[in-house]
Image (cartoon, coloured by chain):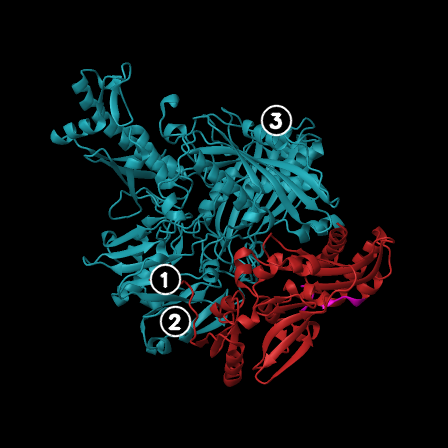
């Protein structure tokens, strides 16, 4: 099949590239409506405080103000978080979602009241006139304090711990007693932001049929159900239309502005727009969780690992949101892609009065990957073998069982990805900088990251295809496009299967009323889930067209193929029919020229949380990063000179998009390694702007060499795996390892700022 | 279509004078409630965050008299001259090299196409990159007002973080630097977190080095972002004067800068880092001067 593919595997610009680069694409903020009101949110200035009273009278009296809402105006203010899953999973994973603060505030920036006014200036003014009488409470800001029994309680429960998952195998104490070398360290990673260019934005209105309609930048259009619940409306009376996103990275997986604008539109009967400022975005949306990770690992002199123990504590922040789900990913990935006989993993997540943690590209994997890969590299050095050798000796291979008990039946591209990344970075001799205070070093890390949602969520997706009478094709699929080309990949699949050029496929996405629900654009699941749903629908239509053509050409359908808008006899390509003619035959004879298909992921039960074993995820993507850095021994500054990213992506659908993900993922977590950190002082964010929250710019981005391996062993269309999130997983430990190689300093506390490196060098 | 995600929350009257006379008349008439807008790269973000309020705002980039580079006798620069125009000036690159390098270190191209040198000075941010460079060239500022003018040295003009001695009704007209004598070489070095960033430390150094004996005849040093304003470092300058350029003098120079940090920001969180990192700037500065 491979050689015959026409569209799959070919570099083709996305169908929306031109509208984007020419500035014609409309993002959520670009839409306006006649009679539209502007909304603003009043946010808590305290991380922990009792709300004694709220007086909205002065705000309401301001000219132009049409509505001021507080918790008492929200029909169902306290609901349970859902994330578009097909199945309710209940206790532990689903928790309180509160629209507006009630009784007490739990974090600085928590929404307390909403205003809608004729102009944005009036709305801003009105927010200032709302008088909230707070009684500050002590709060708890350090997750290590929060887990203590006598700590301040963030929520209404008598413990701050919201999730506790364990996974074990063998006997770690026995494993450590057999070890010749033991390494034990504590690793820390900070809260970090998603830093998407487009801040949260949406407009809500009630259409002429009375349907509450929300046009919004979101990764999850299925939040329409949550909004219906908040307002007490039937689900079919709320419609979400998703716009093209200016980045999501997990930060638009949680509900953002939807409930706010829905409430205000419902109250006023007018369209309402709300767009966050950058500073507000920093305060309002989730963060990648801060983790404290205590790791212990032991190995024989020959480098074979005998035991690994990981105690992980995640700072969930003020509300649970996706924290338990994220923690489950960490539990599964904590011991890394290694075959180790004795494993003990213990993961907890606890509430604090910090910003809330939730999804962020990697979903609990980059944190534990940093700790696990760092300690493996340190272990290698203590034993006296190379970072690559220790991974070659211990990594899992096809047929092995992961620490969490999942047997790897499918092809595992380890250690290949590591070998190729390490060889590529070492292809050239190390640069000798002219500046003798600069030292060059190289490092590597490997990783595994899932694609597709956790199997106990019983994930499904749907896609609808219609063949038009002129030979063009229309696809409808409720997939939000984050800019990663989620929609374009589906078009490519349709073009391939129906033998039409990509330019003749048009896709409509992200509308809960008009496109089949495809599930969330999260969890690196869209190519896998919606790709398979689209492939399934396309193959049904293909079969119908071939069957009709077979009658005409006097052969069986199995003898036919489609390409270049022709259906032809595979053995005698000259015997063919124009595709358009076959379509017209079908149309005239009442053969259905449309199909909607559903794809179901593997389904499992919720695992035993006291010992997570067996299948929790559909499959994993295996990858490696290698990095070359120059460290200035006098200033502690790190310059990343080269990055190699090597992944088994199963099958490349479009090399441009695939490399885009691999390059983007590398730079995304290069910031995690070196500069990014939400700086908090007792729950107050001190750096809520791009002046103070520093991310790498184009000038800081080194050359990224992307090496794609195609095992065709993935669960996605044509054997593809997912790459979106895995692409960022292992770059941070690779950079940190390279810093060690350069100057002998192991940073265990991200980010590796010049201050930390210089202090370690001088120590 | 309304596409601005952040509006200026309060009302003000906006003026766009075309001539200096017109501007000074407006400034005098509407003081103290009138403020000045040049490139807007500092003022607008502040306004959007409600950190800057005014009754009236006067835009000065249409005033031709405030935009010039005159190198006929020393160097005179109009306050509203764009950083990108200064960056392109061959005379500045050649003779006032530290200023050229300092300007190149500010923001990205888009910022330098908007921002003015007068704005960088009057905003008086402690890490302002042009200030150390202007300090080593003994810059004087010409301030004008309706019916008067005065000239003050830059080191007296800025008094602290975002603090200057400019009075209501006054406008920065130009920056004047005396003609350089001898073979003064100069350079500018900066430490940031990423490539485009405000300085954590910046420094301008000028030295007149006798080529035959490799001896520093005189030196000028100014340090920024270490304390609430940039300043000259007389001890470091004195230490360099008369010395042969070698490793030991550079080491002594680095020691003196460490002492400057210890004195300027005692107990500050950033001190342990800055007192060490500044040493690299000392080395880099000399490397660049001698290259």
- Pointers 3 and 2 in contact (C-beta within 8 Å): no
- Quick check: is B232 in the magenta stretch? yes
| Nearest to the observer: residue A215 or residue A139 | A215
Q: CA distance from mark 1 to mark 3?
A: 54 Å
Q: Which residue is mark 2?
A: A121
In terms of depth relative to the viewer, which is nearer, B160 or B112?
B112
Mark-to-mark CA distance, 3 and 2: 64 Å
**Chain that is coloured cyan in the picture:** A
Q: Is residue B265 visible?
A: no
Residue A422 position in % (x across, y down) = 61, 31
What's the mark number on residue A274? 1
In this view, the residue farthest toward the front is B72
The residue that appears at 40% across and 28% down in the rendered structure is A719
* Mark 3 secondary-structure assignment: helix
Give a yes or no on whether discs 3 and 2 share a subunit. yes
Image position, residue A491 (x, y; %)? 32, 36
Query: Are the residues at dot 1 and dot 3 in contact (C-beta closer than 8 Å)?
Result: no
Q: Nearer the viewer, residue A61 or A640?
A: A640
Q: Pointers 1 and 2 in contact (CB under 8 A)?
A: no
Q: Quadrant of residue A464?
A: top left
Depicted A144 relative to depicted A264: above or below: above
Above or below residue A460? Residue A252 is below
**Horizontal placement of A348 versus A755: left or right?**
left
Q: Which residues are magenta?
A: B225-234
Pointer 1 and pointer 3 on the same chain: yes
Q: Which residue is mark 3?
A: A393
Q: Residues within 10 Å of mark 1 (few under 14, many from 20)?
A: many
What secondary structure is marked by label 1?
A: strand
């Amino acid at each position: 099949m491979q050689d015959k593919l026409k569209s799959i595997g070919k570099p083709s610009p996305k169908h929306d590239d031109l509208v984007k680069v020419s500035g014609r694409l409309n993002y959520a903020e670009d839409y306006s409506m006649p009679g539209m009101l502007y909304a603003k949110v009043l946010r808590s200035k305290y991380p922990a405080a009792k709300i004694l009273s709220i007086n909205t009278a002065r705000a309401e009296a301001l000219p132009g103000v049409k509505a001021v809402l507080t918790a008492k105006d929200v029909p169902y203010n306290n609901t349970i978080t859902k994330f578009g899953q097909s199945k309710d999973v209940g206790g532990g994973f689903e928790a309180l979602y509160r629209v507006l603060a009630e009784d007490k505030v739990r974090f600085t920036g928590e929404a307390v009241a909403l205003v809608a006014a004729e102009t944005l200036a009036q709305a801003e003014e009105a927010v200032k006139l709302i008088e909230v009488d707070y009684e500050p409470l002590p709060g708890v800001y350090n997750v290590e304090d929060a887990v203590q029994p006598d700590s301040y309680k963030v929520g209404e429960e008598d413990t701050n711990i919201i999730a506790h998952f364990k996974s074990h195998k063998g006997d770690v104490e026995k494993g450590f007693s057999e070890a010749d070398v033991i390494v034990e360290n504590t690793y820390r990673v900070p809260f970090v932001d998603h830093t998407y260019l487009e801040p949260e934005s949406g407009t809500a209105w009630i259409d002429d049929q009375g349907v509450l309609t929300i046009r919004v930048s979101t990764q999850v259009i299925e939040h329409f159900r949550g909004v219906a619940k908040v307002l007490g409306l039937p689900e079919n009376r709320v419609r979400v239309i998703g716009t093209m996103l200016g980045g999501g990275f997990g930060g638009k997986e949680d509900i953002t502005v939807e409930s706010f604008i829905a409430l205000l539109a419902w109250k006023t009967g007018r369209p309402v727009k709300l767009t966050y400022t950058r500073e507000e975005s920093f305060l309002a949306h989730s963060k990648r969780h801060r983790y404290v990770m205590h790791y212990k690992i032991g190995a024989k002199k020959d480098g074979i690992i005998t035991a690994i123990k990981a105690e992980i504590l995640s700072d969930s922040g003020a509300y649970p949101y996706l924290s338990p789900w994220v923690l489950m990913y960490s539990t599964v990935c904590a011991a890394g892609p290694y075959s180790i006989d004795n494993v003990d993993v213990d993961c907890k997540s606890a509430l604090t009065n910090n910003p809330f943690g939730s999804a962020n590209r990697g979903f609990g994997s980059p944190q534990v990957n940093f700790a696990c890969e760092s300690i493996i590299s340190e272990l290698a050095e203590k034993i006296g073998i190379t970072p690559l050798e220790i991974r070659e000796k211990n990594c899992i291979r096809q047929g092995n069982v992961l620490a969490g008990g999942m047997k790897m039946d499918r092809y595992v591209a380890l250690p290949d990805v590591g070998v190729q990344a390490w060889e590529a970075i070492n292809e050239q001799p190390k640069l000798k900088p002219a500046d003798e205070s600069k030292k060059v070093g190289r490092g590597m890390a490997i990783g595994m990251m899932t694609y597709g949602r956790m199997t106990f969520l019983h994930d499904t997706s749907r896609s609808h295809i219609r063949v038009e009478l002129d030979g063009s094709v229309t696809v409808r699929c409720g997939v939000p496009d984050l800019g990663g080309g989620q929609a374009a990949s589906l078009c490519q699949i349709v073009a391939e299967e129906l033998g039409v050029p990509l330019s003749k496929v048009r896709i409509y996405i992200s509308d809960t009323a008009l496109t089949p629900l495809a599930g969330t654009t999260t969890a690196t699941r869209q190519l896998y889930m919606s790709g398979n749903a689209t492939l399934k629908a396309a193959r049904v239509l293909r079969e119908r067209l071939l069957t009709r053509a077979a009658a005409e050409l006097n052969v069986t359908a199995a003898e036919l193929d489609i390409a270049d808008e022709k259906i032809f006899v595979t053995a005698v390509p000259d015997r063919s029919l124009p595709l358009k003619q076959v379509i017209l035959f079908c149309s005239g004879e009442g053969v259905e020229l449309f199909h909607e298909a559903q794809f179901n992921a593997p389904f499992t039960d919720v695992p035993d949380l006291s010992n997570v074993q067996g299948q929790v995820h559909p499959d994993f993507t295996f990858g490696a990063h290698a990095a070359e850095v120059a460290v200035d021994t006098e200033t502690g500054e790190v310059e990343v000179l080269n990055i190699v990213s090597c992944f088994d992506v199963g099958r490349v659908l479009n090399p441009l998009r695939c490399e885009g993900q691999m390059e983007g993922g590398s730079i995304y977590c290069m910031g995690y390694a070196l500069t990014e950190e939400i700086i908090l002082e007792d729950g107050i964010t001190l750096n809520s702007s791009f002046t103070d929250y520093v991310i790498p710019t184009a000038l800081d981005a080194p050359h990224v060499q992307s090496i794609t391996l195609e095992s065709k062993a993935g669960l996605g269309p044509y054997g593809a795996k997912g790459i979106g999130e895995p692409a960022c997983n292992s770059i941070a430990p690779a950079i940190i390892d390279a810093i060690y190689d350069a100057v002998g300093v192991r940073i265990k506390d991200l980010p590796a700022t010049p201050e930390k490196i210089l202090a370690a060098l001088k120590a | 279509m309304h596409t601005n995600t952040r509006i200026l929350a309060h009302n003000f009257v906006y003026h766009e004078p075309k001539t200096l006379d017109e501007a000074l008349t407006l400034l005098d008439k509407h003081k103290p409630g009138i403020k000045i807008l040049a490139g807007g790269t500092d003022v607008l973000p502040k306004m959007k965050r409600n950190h800057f309020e005014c009754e009236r705002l006067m835009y000065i980039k249409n005033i031709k008299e405030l935009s010039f580079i005159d190198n006929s006798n020393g160097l005179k620069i109009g306050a509203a001259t764009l950083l990108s125009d200064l960056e392109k000036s061959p005379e500045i690159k050649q003779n006032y090299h530290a200023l050229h390098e300092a300007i190149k270190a500010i923001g990205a191209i888009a910022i330098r196409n908007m921002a003015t040198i007068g704005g960088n000075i009057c905003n008086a941010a402690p890490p302002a990159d042009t200030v150390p460079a202007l300090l080593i060239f003994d810059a004087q500022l010409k301030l004008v007002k309706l019916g008067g003018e005065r000239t003050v040295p830059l080191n007296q003009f800025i008094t602290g973080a975002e603090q200057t001695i400019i009075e209501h009704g006054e406008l920065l007209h130009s920056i004047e630097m005396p003609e350089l004598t001898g073979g003064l070489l100069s350079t500018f070095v900066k430490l940031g977190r990423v490539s485009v960033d405000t300085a954590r430390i910046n420094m301008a150094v000028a030295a007149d080095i006798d080529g035959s004996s490799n001896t520093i005849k005189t030196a000028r040093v100014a340090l920024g972002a270490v304390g609430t304003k940039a300043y000259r470092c007389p001890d470091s300058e004195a230490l360099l004067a008369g010395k042969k350029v070698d490793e030991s003098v550079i080491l002594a120079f680095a020691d003196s800068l460490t002492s400057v940090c210890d004195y300027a920001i005692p107990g500050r969180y950033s001190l342990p880092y800055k007192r060490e990192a500044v040493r690299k700037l000392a080395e880099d500065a000399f490397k660049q001067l001698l290259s």
